[in-house]
Image (cartoon, rainbow, N blue to C red):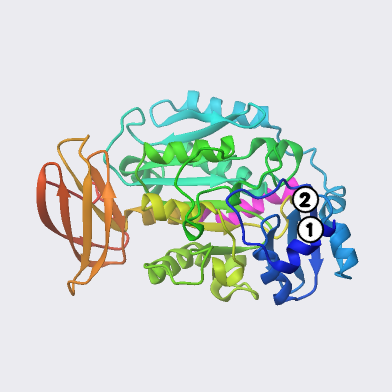
């Protein structure tokens, strides 16, 4: 214990792989200095900072150290003892539901297993698209839920979303347009072991949202040594061109946008705020938040975290991603799930539509690779981005842009216009 206490006093920098989570505590009281100290410590994970305190996760000895320093806390495992888990479906029931939906709607739904969890459970992703067996040149969108196993609300909401979209195809115009002109991917449970164990970490005690490559600490984009659930997501990104994503959590009600690991503003900070507001504005509880103005927050402004999925997805793959906290209770009564779906349904649909607020290029050679420099109407460069699979797409604020394309097929400049609420049959792509 003395070793941990000494390390805390020295504020050891965060490392690529955090220690195994063995103790889960809530520290009471507003203490910014303690938050800063713990955020910089290799063995500790903090989460859900609010006016009452914050969660902290770490190795054995954490509680003893807090007692020695007279820091008030309570054990989150004791809180979980009062939760009724019985009404929630188990993993095999979730799997059976997804298999059944894929079999019922084979023309527009395809269920894939992208890997195995630490305990061997299938990591399942449902693809929804009109030509579901074909890799079309269309904007690619992704929802992932429950990478923290004890944050269960999103798993149930994404299951309901999948079922509604499949059952209303051809009946609801918005849903039909989305499916006809997008490739939509939904992963209800990234951490099925954690959900079965009713815990935050995976079965190996690792926090998956601290396990991704972190640019701030020069962590290479390699899956070597990472958790199997993390590796599955990383491998999936290599083969896809996701342009917009969200991952669902619980413990608060807010839309959280990058960066998480640094206070610098994201190069598309204004766009990310607007995208987050689009989600929050259609959610009554979120938009009226007393804690977060307009129901949104910058990640680092809330609290700094390293190894998060949303920062990684943009830095390495040009995939704009936000984190959506759905419910103050991580594991609410199952009877409350319909209400949460009602509050989030329109937001979830609307956020998928935003994948079409952008522009792209497609080459005749689907194996082509290259780069695209994006310039705004004033000729200012907004960055240069690599592309693979013969296609490139970028979410942008409405306006006029120029794409300077370089590939093995040559160079070309393309003028494009980005419109809001524009779901086009060609996916807003220009052929070159």
Residue 236, relative to residue 66: is it above or below?
above
Given this view, does label 2 or label 1 mark the residue nearer the observer? 1
Q: Residue 351, image x and y in percent?
A: 44, 56
Assess disc 2: are there few (<14), some (14-19) or many (≥20) residues with their C-alpha within 10 Å of its C-alpha. some
* Span shown in magenta: 333-348
Q: Nearer the viewer, residue 241 or 216?
A: 216
Identify which residue, 264 or 268, lies in the foreground.
Answer: 264
**Camera-side residue: 57 or 374?**
57
Where, by quadrant of the figure, is residue 189 drawn? top right
Tell me the quarter of the picture where residue 344 sits.
Answer: bottom right
Can you give x and y, in whole percent of width and height, for residue 188 in the image?
57, 40
**Residue 337 visible:** yes
Where residue 200 appears, as percent x and y from the top left, is 70, 47
Q: Secondary structure at mark 1?
A: helix
Residue 352 seen in the current view: no
Does 371 sit left or right of 199 as displayed?
A: left
Residue drawn 75% across and 42% down?
Answer: 198
Q: Which residue is mark 1?
A: 4
Q: Residue at x 69, y 44 (%)?
A: 201
Residue 59: give its label.
2
Label 2–label 1 contact, CB within 8 A: yes
| Nearest to N terminus: mark 2 or mark 1 | 1
Q: Quadrant of residue 71?
A: bottom right
Relative placement, left or right, of 237 versus 426 is right
At x 24% / y 44%, what residue is drawn? 391
Query: Does the magenta portion include 80?
Result: no
Seen in the picture, residue 111 relative to 407 is either above or below; the reply is above
């Amino acid at each position: 214990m003395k070793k941990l206490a000494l390390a805390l006093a020295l504020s050891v920098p965060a490392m690529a792989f955090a220690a195994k989570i063995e103790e889960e505590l809530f520290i009471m009281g507003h203490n910014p200095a303690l938050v800063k100290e713990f955020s910089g410590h290799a063995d500790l994970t903090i989460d859900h900072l609010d006016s009452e305190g914050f969660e902290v996760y770490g190795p054995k000895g954490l509680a003893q150290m807090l007692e020695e320093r007279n820091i008030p806390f309570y054990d989150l495992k004791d809180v979980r003892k009062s939760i009724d888990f019985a009404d929630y479906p188990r993993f095999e029931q979730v799997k059976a539901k997804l298999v059944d939906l894929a079999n019922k709607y084979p023309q527009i739904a395809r269920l894939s297993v992208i890997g195995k969890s630490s305990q061997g459970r299938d990591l399942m992703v449902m693809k929804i698209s009109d030509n579901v067996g074909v890799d079309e040149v269309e904007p690619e969108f992704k929802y992932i839920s429950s990478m923290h196993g004890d944050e269960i609300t999103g798993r149930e909401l994404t299951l309901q979303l999948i079922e509604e979209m499949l059952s209303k195809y051809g009946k609801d115009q918005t849903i039909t347009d989305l499916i006809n002109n997008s490739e939509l991917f939904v992963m209800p449970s990234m951490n099925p072991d954690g959900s079965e164990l009713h815990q935050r970490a995976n079965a190996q005690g690792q926090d998956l949202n601290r396990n991704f490559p972190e640019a701030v600490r020069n962590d290479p984009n390699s899956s070597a040594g990472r958790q199997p659930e993390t590796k599955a997501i990383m491998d999936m990104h290599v083969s896809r061109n996701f342009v917009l994503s969200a991952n669902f959590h619980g413990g608060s009600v807010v839309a959280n946008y990058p960066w998480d690991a640094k206070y610098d503003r994201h190069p598309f900070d204004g766009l990310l705020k607007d995208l987050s507001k689009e989600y929050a504005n259609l959610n009554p509880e979120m938009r009226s938040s007393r804690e977060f103005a307009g129901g949104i927050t910058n990640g680092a402004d809330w609290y700094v975290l390293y190894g998060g999925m949303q920062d990684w997805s943009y830095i390495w793959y040009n995939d704009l991603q936000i984190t959506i906290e759905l419910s103050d209770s991580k594991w609410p009564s199952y009877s409350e799930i319909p209400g949460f779906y009602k509050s989030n349904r329109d937001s979830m649909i609307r956020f998928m539509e935003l994948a079409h607020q952008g522009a792209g290029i497609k080459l005749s050679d689907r194996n082509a690779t290259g780069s695209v420099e994006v310039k705004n109407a004033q000729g200012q460069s907004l960055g240069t981005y690599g592309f693979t699979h013969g296609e490139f797409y970028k979410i942008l604020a409405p306006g006029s842009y120029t794409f300077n394309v370089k590939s093995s097929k040559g160079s070309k400049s393309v003028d494009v216009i980005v419109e809001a609420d524009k779901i086009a049959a060609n996916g807003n792509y220009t052929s070159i």
